[in-house]
Amino acid sequence: MVTQRELYYKLICTSPEYFHSQLQVNKSIQDVVALLKCTRQSLGIIASSRGLIAGRITLQEDDSNIVDCSVCGSSGYPITGDLNLLNTLIIKSDARYIVVIEKHAIFQRLAEDHMFNKIPCVLITAKGYPDIATRLLLHRISRIYPNLPILALVDWNPAGLAIICTYKYGSIGMGLEAYRYACDVKWLGLRGDDLRLVPEEALVPLKPKDLQIAKSLMSSEMLQDEYKEELELMVRSCERVEIEGLYCHGFDFLGKYLAKKIVQNDYI
């Protein structure tokens, strides 16, 4: 079993005339998966995972010890990059919600505050754009517990929306594999209605890269109308807001903000 990065270094040593970059190797893997209609793990390729999980859920590998993710502290439990192992995990949970968090620091804050005991939930982060392993685990949980709402907490900017869309629709770069990891993720926050909660000083101008991402998202036929309206508001105002902007009300405000929105079903 190898990661895509390990495979790249192996190939530039053994077949330098064919492969010159990591992007080229990634594209070749995608083409092979599409041609053979198989999965990456069946080719012996494992994911390099950045994901963490915490909260009201237990994970067990066959006859191994049970991992209780509610007692893993603010660091959470690292999600393995072994996709075959993720597919065979025994998963049990009494949570009522799954909260997918864009940022590692926000995940740590909520895990440290035991947010999952105030609102029975599972916390998951991929520390930015989601990797395959994190998406696969989330997909498996959603298949086992199909009635659990999956709610995303991201920065109010085009990149935050792009992260939601990656969880929701899959990555364009994965081609035919994308659907295998897609989940029905709802947008909890931050959204345009939340701007009243942050000081004016927390509003930051959009960067050229933000506008580029916004343009790409706008051209997508999959983007639902409510998401397009949020995106249009970002572009019109030419502003972005980070989740940390809520800390102007105190570090404990974030948990209260989430609890209120979740209880009121305030997500799209």
Image (spheres, rainbow, N blue to C red):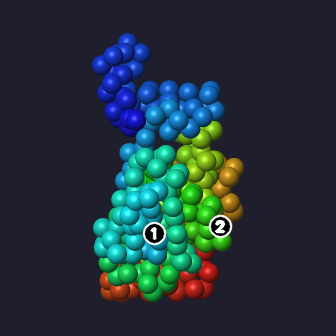
Mark 2 neighbour density, 10 Å: few (under 14) some (14–19) many (20 or more): few
Judge whether 117 appears above or below 192 on screen.
below
Q: Is residue 66 above or below residue 28?
A: below
Picture quadrant where residue 71 is located: bottom left
The residue at the point 61 percent across, 64 percent down is 144
Q: Count the marks: how many?
A: 2
Residue 218 lies, in percent from the top left, at 62, 52
Query: Residue at the spot x=48%, y=52% of the render?
Result: 86
On the rendered structure, is 248 left or right of 268? left
Q: Which residue is mark 2?
A: 146
Secondary element at tag 2: loop
Q: Quadrant of the N terminus?
A: top left
Q: Nearer the viewer, mark 1 or mark 2?
A: 1
Residue 240 at x, y percent in the picture: 44, 65
Residue under the image location 50 percent in, 76 percent down = 121
Of the pair 179 and 61, the residue shown nearer to us: 61
Q: Splitting the image into 4 quarters, where does residue 46 fall?
A: top left
Residue 106 seen by the camera: no
Residue for badge 1: 58
| View extreme (top): residue | 17
Name the amino acid, label 2: Pro
Foreground pick, 199 / 246: 246
Q: x, y percentage for residue 230?
A: 59, 66
Q: Earlier in the sequence, mark 1 or mark 2?
A: 1
User: Rounded to the nearest whole Å, what is the CA distance between mark 1 and mark 2?
Assistant: 17 Å
Tell me if mark 1 has few (under 14), some (14-19) or many (20+) residues whose alpha carbon lies within 10 angstroms of its own. some
Task: Please state which amino acid type lies under the numbered disc 1.
Answer: Thr
Residue depicted at 40% across the width and 20% down the height: 19
Check disc 1 and report its element: helix, strand or loop.
strand
Q: Is residue 92 visible?
A: yes
Instruction: In the rendered view, tell whether residue 37 sits above or below residue 58.
Output: above
